[in-house]
Amino acid sequence: MVFEVHDGIEHRIDLALGNAPADLLLKNARLVNVLSGDIHPADIAVADGMIVGFGDYQAKKVVDCQGRYVCPGLIDGHIHIESTLLTPWEFARAAAPRGTCAVVWDPHEIGNVLGRAGIETLLELTRDCPLDFYVMIPSCVPATNMETSGAVLNAEDVAYLAGRYPERVLGLAELMNYPGVLAKDPAIMAKIAACQCKIIDGHAPLLSGKQLNAYIAAGPSSDHECTDPREAVEKLRAGMHLLMREGSDERNLTDLVGVVNEHNAANISLVCDDREPIDLTTNGHMDHNVRMAIGLGLDPMRAIQMASINTARHYGLRGRGAVAPGYRADLLVLDDLQGFKVWKAFLKGRDVAETTFGPSGQVPQENTVHLSCSGGKLRAEDFAIPQVSHEVRCIGAIPGQIISKALKVTPKVVDGFAVADPSRDIAKVAVVERHGRNGNIGLAFVNGLSLARGAVAGTVAHDAHNLIVAGMDDADMALAGNVLAECGGGYVVVAGGKVLAKLELHFAGLMSLRPFEEVVAAQKALHAAYESIAVDPAAGARPFMALSFMSLAVIPELKLTDQGLVDVTLFEKVGLWL
Amino acid sequence: MVFEVHDGIEHRIDLALGNAPADLLLKNARLVNVLSGDIHPADIAVADGMIVGFGDYQAKKVVDCQGRYVCPGLIDGHIHIESTLLTPWEFARAAAPRGTCAVVWDPHEIGNVLGRAGIETLLELTRDCPLDFYVMIPSCVPATNMETSGAVLNAEDVAYLAGRYPERVLGLAELMNYPGVLAKDPAIMAKIAACQCKIIDGHAPLLSGKQLNAYIAAGPSSDHECTDPREAVEKLRAGMHLLMREGSDERNLTDLVGVVNEHNAANISLVCDDREPIDLTTNGHMDHNVRMAIGLGLDPMRAIQMASINTARHYGLRGRGAVAPGYRADLLVLDDLQGFKVWKAFLKGRDVAETTFGPSGQVPQENTVHLSCSGGKLRAEDFAIPQVSHEVRCIGAIPGQIISKALKVTPKVVDGFAVADPSRDIAKVAVVERHGRNGNIGLAFVNGLSLARGAVAGTVAHDAHNLIVAGMDDADMALAGNVLAECGGGYVVVAGGKVLAKLELHFAGLMSLRPFEEVVAAQKALHAAYESIAVDPAAGARPFMALSFMSLAVIPELKLTDQGLVDVTLFEKVGLWL
């Protein structure tokens, strides 16, 4: 038997001994060493994308840090890249200069639209990206059987992806269906079995006591849904790794930061879960969460550990999350530690400013918006609601929240049809099945969007990502839907038969293929267009978020899918008319 | 494809929900929760050897802890079980009631005597032991080419054992030959390659700077040889997991404990490396180290973490090292936290007091002491040293230390032969090859054993474990050696042609097959016998330790192997006569 020396160990020994020049030397750094827990002066040598060691090394390139702090690149332990509306490579281009070196991605939205093939496509397209995309396989696609998704992910898909990408697929993503776990649902048990020995992320808001014990018995080892410190402490005690979330939409850090202590910090990571494009480019990604944690009183050492080594260790990312010999040279030079301002970022030892992030291959161009309604086009009459009685269930949108209220209202009726009523802020809303499966259209009313006229539509509509349209005018609603069907999805604002603003999300109806700067500009234009047809001139981003979550039938209280209204508290479909 | 639900997850869910009774409930505990870093009241349910969860569970057996502290069982991250002179199962019977639930064992001594087959035998014999024996494969057998060992372990052996015992063989043990690593010695490179992806334990006393970087580049991820805080900090900064040692022979905890801080503690473990039988039964095992760490000022939470979860995580022992749902039910009920006094210990949920530890099969009975000298018996004349000049090199034993001094003395000469001289505390010492390979006998003099007459011998003689004999009388030396050869090895004290005390170590000449209480009694008898023939009536244990390390040719300054004297500083063999 001959044992091949692996990974060029001999060359690495030579480099470390100084027998061969390094590629890069970061001189005069003050290293925030997350392993030794101290900050010490260091000259840091890098070669072949890895840290060679600390010391007086010869190098082809020298960067004088002039006493600046150096820390490891940041890792997001739980994110849906889809929330950025960007392709992964554009996300990387936006996030890397701010310090992100790796993400643990749950491609739940792509999974719902394109299934296993879509996830595999994106794994391939991000294969060589200098920012690492690790993937957790979505565990709950579709999320419920009360909506029509574009795909189903079953145990075979989990096993296939885990086997095909053993290094990058880390396990099973947020196991949202905890009632199914507790009921020993065979499909869920099979997915857990298919994922044997890999990591299972939990998602169990407010689960407690024996039910929490049972959930953990099934395998989930983390939770990112805590909103209350007591809940967080109970989950830590029960052995879960706490993914402390601060997203664009779901903000928990302020409430939870007090849970961190010197004996449990290793079991806590900062994560963002979602990041909207404007938020990403204005406030940042993980750098924002680290900055905020420091601002809330955490020692910078601890905040950085919670965004680097803790996360790397929980997910078994060897050689990641620290600056030490043999670790990957993902590191940041900071202008300011307390304010966590990145001066330079390096990925695999290369300055991010000199790095490209393009896809590893041709990006598929097909339009994934397939309407099955008559003629493949929506008409105003598709949104007509004939009167049946005198009162309807109405979704009550709550500004800045993904939950909704279940309201009851007496609709305005014209010629035997219930119609939108701008005077009471009651719009019509429709969810149109767009995966070419059945042509379903769910219809209802929504209060709280602040719309005066026109319509707004989007193909980002959790979790099945059908086409959702809300408006005060049926013809504008039909136009909005048709515009998105034609361009392959996105967001659009229309009024008076005219398109006021549009953001195309051609990839799966979820991601733009444009540079992130253009996406941000387009999103701002959408907000401005919305404000131009809104009652409240500050409505801005509100309706887009509300619409995106209005079909999420696992979040209370009243939601709409292509199959109609869902009373989430009862977890069953209900009629529009009372 | 059908995915079998693994490990009885469904049954565990039922147990956690309380749908089936637990085996055991520890009521009214105060749990030292090493994951949440707090101490909280808990009723802890156990079933099938695992923690079900915290809560009000029905159980077949209830133990009322009456407010006592509960903590996880202790894990020793680096031990040579051979140092206890006990079989692993007798070690377990002694250590388990004191709180040990698992050890990471480097069977370096067994490897030197019996090679791969011996390690495999012990892996089999400990297969079902309720105290877990994880094994690191000895990386340096033989330790040098200046001694004759019983076996050689090469890369094939490493690959074989790692492949045959994937769960229990964790990697490559202490890589002592760091000069060989830095020189890219092909045999070492091959062993590292054979161990790919497993853990490599370091052993690099005082290695620093670029050499340390190069050593780490080869793979070692821990170090247990630090003696100085600055050394410990450098190794932590370089990413090594610090195994903070407090052994019977090598005591570093007092010097190193100040290195621990709230940001680096997760990267530090307490280990013992060696534990002599009297020390084990008098002071304890890891409980002693935890108690001492607390006494030195560490928070009990931290000290316990350093002897449980930190070690489990470094070695990748999933579901070990904490008390939480899904973890193995290895836990301790303490009478006193600060004093770390164990009231009850549980292994896999069973009270250690009701547990048996016997071997999993028949223990091999062969005598491994094979003398190749003429007739297979030692004679007095085998120890004769004809005069060559007027000055000899003489080993200077240092009480309580494993290093020795290189002395020069003018020996007493009688009838043309250099002889022992009790008046100057100069004894004769011999290392007799005992693996049946070549009949070598290395001869020299030693100062510092405090021997007045007679002889002492042992087959525990690092690292090749040949037969070492020291004495003031050649005939007694021959008798001592022959007694051990006949019984299969051990320790013996003789004087005036009579055996004064003997401890048989029949297994490999390293381990007693007797109960630990008898081994302790026999060791005390040996010490007493030695004192009866010593000048210093308090000589006690001193000579046995000195003898065991007198042939360890990697520890300075002057050592003796079967091939003669070794100047360790020069790392070469030297003559007796100057």
Image (cartoon, coloured by chain):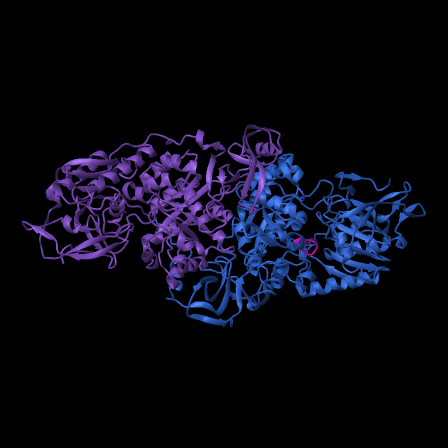
Chain colours: A purple, B blue
Residue A344 pos. (x, y %): 47, 34
Image height of A518 relative to B275, above or below: above
- Main SS, magenta region, reads loop
Image position of A382 (left or right of B488) = left
Image position of B200 (left or right of B406) = left
| Of residues B522 and A86, the one drawn nearer to the viewer in this rendering | A86
Extreme residue in the right direction? B415
| Residue at position x 70%, y 57% in the image | B505
Residue B283 occupies quadrant = bottom right
Q: Is residue A25 visible?
A: yes
Extreme residue in the top direction? A60
Q: How many labels were placed on the picture?
A: 0
Image height of B501 relative to A548, above or below: below
Quarter of the N terminus of chain A within the rendering: top right
Residue B120 pos. (x, y %): 59, 50
| Of residues B131 and A391, the one drawn nearer to the viewer in this rendering | A391
Tell whether position A500 is magenta.
Answer: no
| Residue at position x 60%, y 32% in the image | A57
Extreme residue in the left direction? A415
Quarter of the C terminus of chain A within the rendering: bottom left
Residue A10 pos. (x, y %): 59, 33
Q: Is residue B218 visible?
A: no
| Of residues B157 and B522, the one drawn nearer to the viewer in this rendering | B522
| Of residues A57 and A464, the one drawn nearer to the viewer in this rendering | A57
Residue B534 pos. (x, y %): 84, 59
Residue A132 occupies quadrant = top left
Tell whether position B247 is magenta.
Answer: yes
Extreme residue in the front direction? A537
Magenta residues (range): B246-252
